[in-house]
């Protein structure tokens, strides 16, 4: 039927190499991840809402400030003066790393507030797109990428 056998081989090869649903999903996830690598992606959650996060994605745990404060306040005496002295000592002993943890924790809360995050987990891309409730960040990124492609 075909004038050249080469054409038949090409057609056979095409039939054997049809993309499956799984390979299409994998390609879509890879494209979303490639886009995410270039985008500003932040995940807002807390210790009670575990998320699956690819490497390199910034995760903000909104309960981090309360956890750090609880560490500082652990086993304090009832006397306010003694308690204050112990907390000051703990802050001093923690040094710059503790100060950085506190600053980062509160900056994360501020960022969530300024972005208008209302529920967790929340995956935010480019400070513009958000997916709420998705614990698989790769899936959330794919949903955002799909939406961006559909919108001119």
Image (cartoon, rainbow, N blue to C red):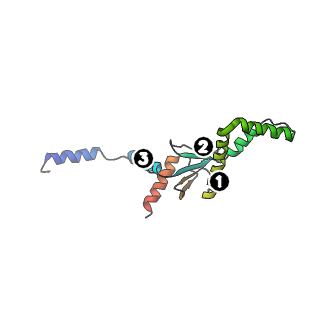
Q: Quadrant of the C terminus?
A: bottom left
Q: Nearer the viewer, residue 32 or 92?
A: 92
Viewed as shown, does residue 8 lie left or right of 65?
left
Q: Which residue is mark 3?
A: 30
Q: CA distance from mark 2 to mark 3?
A: 22 Å
Q: Quadrant of residue 72?
A: top right
**Relative horizontal placement of residue 127, taking residue 83 as reference (left or right):** left
Please report the residue visible at 79 percent of the width from the left and 36 percent of the height from the top.
86
- Residue 144 drawn at (x, y percent): 49, 55
Res. 110 mark: 1
Answer with mark 2 or mark 1, whichever residue precedes in sequence.
Answer: 2
Furthest residue to the bottom? 152
Numbered label attached to residue 50:
2
Q: CA distance from mark 2 to mark 1?
A: 21 Å
What residue lies at 43% left-to-right and 48% top-to-bottom? 34
Residue 139: image x %, image y %? 49, 49
Please tell me which of labels 2 and 3 falls first in the chain.
Answer: 3
């Amino acid at each position: 039927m075909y004038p050249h056998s080469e054409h038949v081989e090409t057609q056979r090869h095409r039939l054997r190499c049809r993309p499956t649903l799984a390979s299409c999903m994998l390609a879509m996830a890879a494209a979303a991840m490639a886009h995410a690598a270039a985008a500003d992606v932040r995940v807002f959650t807390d210790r009670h809402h575990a998320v699956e996060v690819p490497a390199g994605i910034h995760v903000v745990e909104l309960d981090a400030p309360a956890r750090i404060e609880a560490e500082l306040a652990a086993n304090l005496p009832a006397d306010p003066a003694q308690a204050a002295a112990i907390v000051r000592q703990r802050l001093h002993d923690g040094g710059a790393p503790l100060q950085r943890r506190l600053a980062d924790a509160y900056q994360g809360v501020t960022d969530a507030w300024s972005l208008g995050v209302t529920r967790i987990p929340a995956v935010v891309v480019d400070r513009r797109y958000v997916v709420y409730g998705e614990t698989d960040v790769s899936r959330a990124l794919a949903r955002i990428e799909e939406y961006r492609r559909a919108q001119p």
